[in-house]
Protein backbone atom coordinates (compact mmCIF):
# COMPACT_ATOMS: atom_id res chain seq x y z
CA UNK A 1 0.00 0.00 0.00
CA UNK A 2 1.37 3.38 -1.01
CA UNK A 3 1.86 5.86 1.81
CA UNK A 4 -0.14 9.08 1.57
CA UNK A 5 1.89 12.16 2.38
CA UNK A 6 -0.28 14.76 4.05
CA UNK A 7 0.36 18.48 3.98
CA UNK A 8 1.40 19.75 7.39
CA UNK A 9 -0.86 22.08 9.31
CA UNK A 10 0.41 25.56 10.02
CA UNK A 11 -0.93 28.21 12.36
CA UNK A 12 -0.76 31.25 10.10
CA UNK A 13 -2.17 33.47 12.82
CA UNK A 14 1.02 33.34 14.91
CA UNK A 15 3.22 34.86 12.22
CA UNK A 16 3.86 38.58 12.09
CA UNK A 17 2.90 40.38 8.89
CA UNK A 18 6.37 40.06 7.36
CA UNK A 19 6.61 36.31 8.06
CA UNK A 20 3.04 35.79 6.91
CA UNK A 21 3.50 37.62 3.61
CA UNK A 22 6.81 35.90 2.89
CA UNK A 23 5.33 32.46 3.57
CA UNK A 24 2.41 33.11 1.22
CA UNK A 25 4.72 34.51 -1.46
CA UNK A 26 6.79 31.32 -1.40
CA UNK A 27 3.57 29.28 -1.47
CA UNK A 28 2.48 31.19 -4.58
CA UNK A 29 5.80 30.39 -6.28
CA UNK A 30 5.47 26.69 -5.46
CA UNK A 31 1.94 26.63 -6.90
CA UNK A 32 3.10 28.35 -10.08
CA UNK A 33 5.97 25.90 -10.42
CA UNK A 34 3.69 22.87 -10.06
CA UNK A 35 0.95 24.30 -12.29
CA UNK A 36 -2.68 25.04 -11.47
CA UNK A 37 -3.99 22.16 -13.54
CA UNK A 38 -1.73 19.63 -11.81
CA UNK A 39 -2.99 20.83 -8.43
CA UNK A 40 -6.64 21.12 -9.42
CA UNK A 41 -6.73 24.80 -8.49
CA UNK A 42 -9.15 27.23 -10.13
CA UNK A 43 -7.69 30.29 -11.84
CA UNK A 44 -10.03 32.69 -10.04
CA UNK A 45 -9.01 31.50 -6.57
CA UNK A 46 -5.32 31.73 -7.39
CA UNK A 47 -5.68 35.20 -8.91
CA UNK A 48 -7.41 36.37 -5.73
CA UNK A 49 -4.61 34.79 -3.70
CA UNK A 50 -1.98 36.71 -5.69
CA UNK A 51 -3.96 39.93 -5.41
CA UNK A 52 -4.15 39.56 -1.63
CA UNK A 53 -0.40 38.98 -1.42
CA UNK A 54 0.14 42.25 -3.29
CA UNK A 55 -2.14 44.02 -0.80
CA UNK A 56 -0.21 42.47 2.08
CA UNK A 57 3.00 43.77 0.55
CA UNK A 58 1.42 47.23 0.29
CA UNK A 59 0.48 46.98 3.96
CA UNK A 60 4.18 46.88 4.76
CA UNK A 61 4.36 50.42 3.40
CA UNK A 62 1.70 51.43 5.93
CA UNK A 63 4.00 50.15 8.66
CA UNK A 64 6.76 52.34 7.29
CA UNK A 65 4.38 55.32 7.32
CA UNK A 66 3.65 54.57 10.97
CA UNK A 67 7.40 54.44 11.64
CA UNK A 68 7.85 57.79 9.89
CA UNK A 69 5.11 59.28 12.08
CA UNK A 70 6.91 58.09 15.20
CA UNK A 71 10.20 59.57 13.96
CA UNK A 72 8.49 62.87 13.16
CA UNK A 73 7.13 63.01 16.69
CA UNK A 74 10.60 62.44 18.14
CA UNK A 75 12.19 65.11 15.93
CA UNK A 76 9.43 67.58 16.84
CA UNK A 77 10.10 66.92 20.51
CA UNK A 78 13.78 67.75 19.97
CA UNK A 79 12.85 70.91 18.06
CA UNK A 80 10.64 72.03 20.92
CA UNK A 81 13.43 71.47 23.44
CA UNK A 82 15.88 73.61 21.46
CA UNK A 83 13.26 76.31 20.85
CA UNK A 84 12.50 76.47 24.56
CA UNK A 85 16.21 76.63 25.36
CA UNK A 86 16.89 79.46 22.90
CA UNK A 87 13.90 81.63 23.76
CA UNK A 88 14.41 81.17 27.49
CA UNK A 89 18.12 81.94 27.08
CA UNK A 90 17.44 85.20 25.27
CA UNK A 91 14.92 86.24 27.91
CA UNK A 92 17.20 85.44 30.83
CA UNK A 93 20.11 87.35 29.30
CA UNK A 94 18.05 90.56 29.39
CA UNK A 95 19.02 90.92 33.06
CA UNK A 96 22.59 89.72 32.77
CA UNK A 97 24.93 92.08 34.67
CA UNK A 98 27.61 91.54 32.05
CA UNK A 99 26.92 94.24 29.47
CA UNK A 100 28.18 92.29 26.45
CA UNK A 101 25.93 89.34 27.20
CA UNK A 102 22.99 91.58 28.11
CA UNK A 103 23.31 93.40 24.78
CA UNK A 104 23.53 90.11 22.86
CA UNK A 105 20.51 88.74 24.70
CA UNK A 106 18.51 91.90 24.09
CA UNK A 107 19.22 91.92 20.36
CA UNK A 108 18.36 88.24 19.95
CA UNK A 109 15.28 88.56 22.16
CA UNK A 110 13.96 91.39 20.00
CA UNK A 111 14.77 89.44 16.82
CA UNK A 112 12.83 86.40 18.01
CA UNK A 113 9.94 88.13 19.79
CA UNK A 114 7.55 87.47 16.84
CA UNK A 115 8.20 83.74 17.34
CA UNK A 116 7.21 83.55 21.02
CA UNK A 117 4.22 81.26 20.28
CA UNK A 118 6.04 79.14 17.71
CA UNK A 119 5.79 75.84 19.62
CA UNK A 120 1.99 75.93 19.62
CA UNK A 121 1.56 76.54 15.88
CA UNK A 122 0.10 73.90 13.49
CA UNK A 123 2.88 71.59 12.41
CA UNK A 124 3.51 72.85 8.86
CA UNK A 125 3.22 76.48 9.93
CA UNK A 126 5.57 75.74 12.79
CA UNK A 127 8.16 74.26 10.42
CA UNK A 128 8.00 77.34 8.19
CA UNK A 129 8.29 79.65 11.19
CA UNK A 130 11.35 77.79 12.44
CA UNK A 131 12.92 78.48 9.04
CA UNK A 132 12.12 82.17 9.53
CA UNK A 133 13.50 82.13 13.07
CA UNK A 134 16.77 80.58 11.91
CA UNK A 135 17.05 83.07 9.05
CA UNK A 136 16.67 85.97 11.50
CA UNK A 137 19.10 84.51 14.02
CA UNK A 138 21.78 83.86 11.42
CA UNK A 139 21.70 87.31 9.87
CA UNK A 140 25.15 88.86 9.76
CA UNK A 141 24.29 91.36 12.49
CA UNK A 142 23.20 88.60 14.88
CA UNK A 143 26.02 86.10 14.39
CA UNK A 144 28.34 87.89 16.86
CA UNK A 145 25.57 87.77 19.47
CA UNK A 146 25.16 84.02 19.00
CA UNK A 147 28.89 83.60 19.50
CA UNK A 148 28.82 85.81 22.58
CA UNK A 149 26.19 83.60 24.19
CA UNK A 150 27.80 80.41 22.87
CA UNK A 151 24.60 79.12 21.28
CA UNK A 152 25.45 79.10 17.59
CA UNK A 153 25.72 75.30 17.69
CA UNK A 154 22.21 75.03 19.15
CA UNK A 155 20.83 77.11 16.26
CA UNK A 156 22.66 74.89 13.76
CA UNK A 157 21.21 71.80 15.47
CA UNK A 158 17.71 73.27 15.26
CA UNK A 159 18.20 73.97 11.57
CA UNK A 160 19.38 70.40 10.89
CA UNK A 161 16.38 68.97 12.74
CA UNK A 162 13.97 71.24 10.90
CA UNK A 163 15.39 70.30 7.49
CA UNK A 164 15.13 66.61 8.40
CA UNK A 165 11.58 67.08 9.68
CA UNK A 166 10.46 68.88 6.53
CA UNK A 167 11.91 66.17 4.28
CA UNK A 168 10.42 63.33 6.31
CA UNK A 169 7.02 65.04 6.38
CA UNK A 170 7.05 65.31 2.58
CA UNK A 171 8.04 61.65 2.22
CA UNK A 172 5.21 60.57 4.51
CA UNK A 173 2.72 62.63 2.54
CA UNK A 174 3.84 60.96 -0.71
CA UNK A 175 3.56 57.52 0.90
CA UNK A 176 0.07 58.20 2.22
CA UNK A 177 -1.09 59.22 -1.25
CA UNK A 178 0.37 56.15 -2.99
CA UNK A 179 -0.61 53.52 -0.40
CA UNK A 180 -4.30 52.66 0.09
CA UNK A 181 -5.54 52.06 3.61
CA UNK A 182 -5.65 48.31 4.19
CA UNK A 183 -7.52 46.50 6.94
CA UNK A 184 -4.83 43.94 7.59
CA UNK A 185 -6.86 41.79 10.00
CA UNK A 186 -9.74 41.28 7.56
CA UNK A 187 -7.32 40.73 4.68
CA UNK A 188 -5.42 38.03 6.55
CA UNK A 189 -8.67 36.29 7.50
CA UNK A 190 -9.76 36.19 3.86
CA UNK A 191 -6.33 35.08 2.67
CA UNK A 192 -6.24 32.27 5.24
CA UNK A 193 -9.44 30.87 3.74
CA UNK A 194 -8.00 31.01 0.23
CA UNK A 195 -4.80 29.33 1.42
CA UNK A 196 -6.83 26.52 3.01
CA UNK A 197 -8.72 26.04 -0.25
CA UNK A 198 -5.55 25.95 -2.36
CA UNK A 199 -3.75 23.54 -0.06
CA UNK A 200 -6.78 21.24 0.23
CA UNK A 201 -7.18 21.10 -3.55
CA UNK A 202 -3.48 20.38 -3.99
CA UNK A 203 -3.57 17.54 -1.45
CA UNK A 204 -6.70 16.01 -2.98
CA UNK A 205 -5.08 16.10 -6.41
CA UNK A 206 -1.93 14.43 -5.09
CA UNK A 207 -4.06 11.54 -3.82
CA UNK A 208 -6.74 11.27 -6.52
CA UNK A 209 -4.50 12.01 -9.52
CA UNK A 210 -0.90 11.64 -8.37
CA UNK A 211 1.78 13.14 -10.57
CA UNK A 212 5.39 14.16 -10.21
CA UNK A 213 4.32 17.80 -10.04
CA UNK A 214 1.74 17.54 -7.26
CA UNK A 215 3.87 15.12 -5.24
CA UNK A 216 6.80 17.52 -5.46
CA UNK A 217 4.52 20.34 -4.39
CA UNK A 218 3.45 18.47 -1.24
CA UNK A 219 7.08 17.80 -0.30
CA UNK A 220 8.05 21.41 -1.02
CA UNK A 221 5.17 23.02 0.88
CA UNK A 222 5.89 20.79 3.88
CA UNK A 223 9.52 21.91 3.84
CA UNK A 224 8.41 25.53 3.57
CA UNK A 225 6.11 25.09 6.56
CA UNK A 226 8.92 23.49 8.58
CA UNK A 227 11.46 26.17 7.66
CA UNK A 228 9.04 29.01 8.39
CA UNK A 229 8.07 27.52 11.74
CA UNK A 230 11.72 27.10 12.73
CA UNK A 231 12.45 30.72 11.77
CA UNK A 232 9.45 31.83 13.82
CA UNK A 233 10.63 29.89 16.89
CA UNK A 234 14.12 31.36 16.55
CA UNK A 235 12.66 34.86 16.43
CA UNK A 236 10.52 34.15 19.49
CA UNK A 237 13.55 32.78 21.33
CA UNK A 238 15.55 35.90 20.54
CA UNK A 239 12.64 38.06 21.69
CA UNK A 240 12.40 36.18 25.00
CA UNK A 241 16.16 36.54 25.59
CA UNK A 242 16.01 40.26 24.77
CA UNK A 243 13.03 40.81 27.09
CA UNK A 244 14.89 38.92 29.82
CA UNK A 245 17.94 41.16 29.44
CA UNK A 246 15.76 44.28 29.64
CA UNK A 247 14.21 43.18 32.94
CA UNK A 248 17.57 42.43 34.57
Image: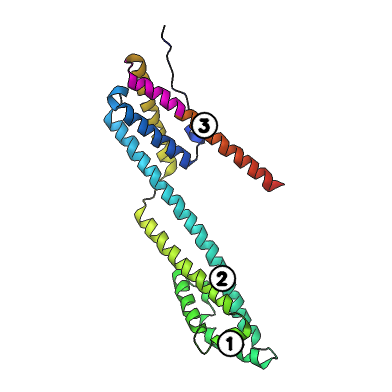
Q: Main secondary structure of the magenta part?
A: helix
The percent coordinates of residue 141 (x first, y second) are: 52, 90
The percent coordinates of residue 113 (x first, y second) are: 54, 84
182 or 243, nearer to the observer:
243
Q: Secondary structure at mark 3?
A: helix
Please give the residue where the numbered disc 2 appears in the rendered image.
Answer: 80
Mark 2 or mark 1, which has the lower sequence index?
Answer: 2
Please give the residue where the numbered disc 1 appears in the rendered image.
Answer: 145
Would you place residue 126 above or below residue 41 in this image? below
Residue 216 lies in the magenta stretch: yes
Q: Residue at x 50, y 79 (%)?
A: 134
Distance from the alpha carbon under mark 2 to that under mark 1? 22 Å
Distance from the alpha carbon under mark 3 to that under mark 2? 46 Å
Distance from the alpha carbon under mark 1 to that under mark 3? 63 Å
Would you place residue 237 above or below residue 106 in this image? above
Q: Residue at x 37, y 43 (%)?
A: 55
Residue neighbourhood size for the residue with mark 1, other residues' Cα within 10 Å, grouped as few (<14), some (14–19), many (≥20): many
Picture quadrant where residue 185 is located: top left
The percent coordinates of residue 213 (x first, y second) are: 33, 22
Would you place residue 97 above or below residue 167 in this image? below
Q: Secondary structure at mark 1?
A: helix
Please give the residue where the numbered disc 3 appears in the rendered image.
Answer: 229
In magenta, the rendered stretch is 209-223
Amino acid sequence: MEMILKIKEVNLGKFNNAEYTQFLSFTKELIEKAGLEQLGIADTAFEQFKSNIELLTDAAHQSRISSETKELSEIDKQRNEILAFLLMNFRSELKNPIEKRRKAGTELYNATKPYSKIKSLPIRQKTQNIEGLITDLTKEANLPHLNTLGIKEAVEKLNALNVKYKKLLANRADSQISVPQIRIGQLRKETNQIYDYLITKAFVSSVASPSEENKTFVHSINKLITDTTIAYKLRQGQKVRKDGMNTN
